[in-house]
Amino acid sequence: MRGEAWVWLIGGLLLVSLWLREAQLFVIACILLLVAAVSYVWQRYCLNGVAYQRTLAQKRAFHGESVPLTVEVRNDKPLPLPWIEVEDTIPGGRITLQPAHSTPSHIPGRRLLTMLLSVRWYERVRRHYQIQCTARGVHAFGPATLRTGDVFGLQTQELELEQEDYLLVYPRIVPLEQLRLPSRSPFGDVPARQQWLFEDPMRTVGVREYRAGDSPRRFHWKATARAPDQTLQVKVYEPTTTHRLQVLLNVITSEHNWSWQGYDPEALEAAITTAASVANWATEHGLLVGLAANAKLFHSSESVRIVPSRHPQQLMHILEALARLVPIGSMPAESLVELEAHELSYGTTVVMVTSLANQALLQQLQQLRRKGHQPVLLLVSSEEQPLAQLDGLPAYAIRVQDTR
């Protein structure tokens, strides 16, 4: 019953008691009037000074790790809250909270963490949970809804809290032996001959005059402007024998890249795990490793592309990019290979991780080999399938169950 209806009912009862001169009816009417007044005051001020805080012990976690989550309800006023209901939106799927009672949400892939509390004046109540990080990705916590009212339960008030907190979970990493790749030189022989010198574009050691065939990316415009006759100058990079490994990831899991068709989550997660495991292996063996994928990053318009580097944090940058990856292909896999071919240093090992391998992709990988690179195909599938003859292109079949 609405508050206006209660007022009219109590007012009518009070008039009837006065007209009939019924003392007991008058007392009942006064009590109901007092109840209505208390209910109105409680409903008006119950959410004043109420705060809700959600605290994640850490913002990043590895696959399988447990992260503490603390939620706090604070009442900073002298009016107590006999009851307050909290509904906080939490990730669904394989992300679980323990101990917690969650209910389905109207948002796909989300659930509601429900709490019913009693908070006295100037009191704060905390609840502690453990998040089991068993799914890669960026997981959002929030928004939340606070619902409370008077002690009689006649009226309620709601407060919507739009703030969200994010937990980034890195992809799973498994040994290459588990993927049934050769334990020694899984991606072919790493060039060891000292006369095979590569150039490190991150280290410029000088300039020289332009020669026919030099890449436009080597132009040094400031040195050209300082030259006496303004002869075109190009950068000279430091030679190095450190080998490079570039991981290319295809996120498309269906023959036709139609967004309405969705994607195969098991095949995609297996491909991401494979890419992360390859990058981890390359880092452990001292290789310069990079990553590129035909996908965008979460809450960003940038494509996934990390140039090969020996930086100590390179592996973490790659894992974070794989965790933030959006499972929607931005271009065909063959276009990704063609685009990356213009940026690769000579002799780079290119590991193509994909669940689909059409003729156009195979042709682009063969083109890389003719340019002096070392392409390797890792084909991820739910069932073991024999690889067709690829004209000398190294290829391995990765089963989805081997990545778990």
Image: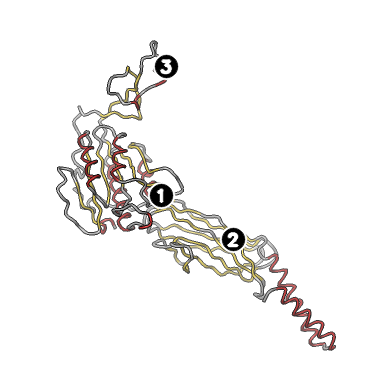
Residue that carries the numbered disc 1 in the rendered image: 324
Q: Kindly indicate the quadrant of the structure image that contains residue 232.
A: top left
Residue that carries the numbered disc 2 in the rendered image: 160
Amino acid residing under circle 2: Glu
Amino acid residing under circle 3: Ala
Q: Is residue 120 visible?
A: yes
Label 1 to label 3: alpha-carbon separation: 42 Å
Q: Earlier in the sequence, mark 1 or mark 3?
A: 3
Q: Secondary structure at mark 2?
A: strand
- Which of 334/383 is in front? 334
Q: Which is more foreground, mark 1 or mark 3?
A: 3
Q: Are marks 2 and 3 in contact (CB under 8 Å)?
A: no
Query: Residue 262 placed where, x, y %?
Result: 36, 57
Within-10-Å neighbours for mark 2: few <14, some 14–19, many 20+: few
Total labels drawn = 3
Q: Kindly indicate the quadrant of the structure image that contains residue 151.
A: bottom right
Residue that carries the numbered disc 3 in the rendered image: 225
Residue at 28 percent across and 43 percent down: it is: 334
> Could you tell whether 253 is left or right of 104 in the image?
left
Q: Earlier in the sequence, mark 2 or mark 3?
A: 2
Seen as rendered, the residue at the extreme top is 228
Location of the N terminus by quadrant is bottom right
Query: Residue 396 placed where, x, y %?
Result: 20, 49
Label 2 to label 1: alpha-carbon separation: 27 Å
Within-10-Å neighbours for mark 3: few <14, some 14–19, many 20+: few
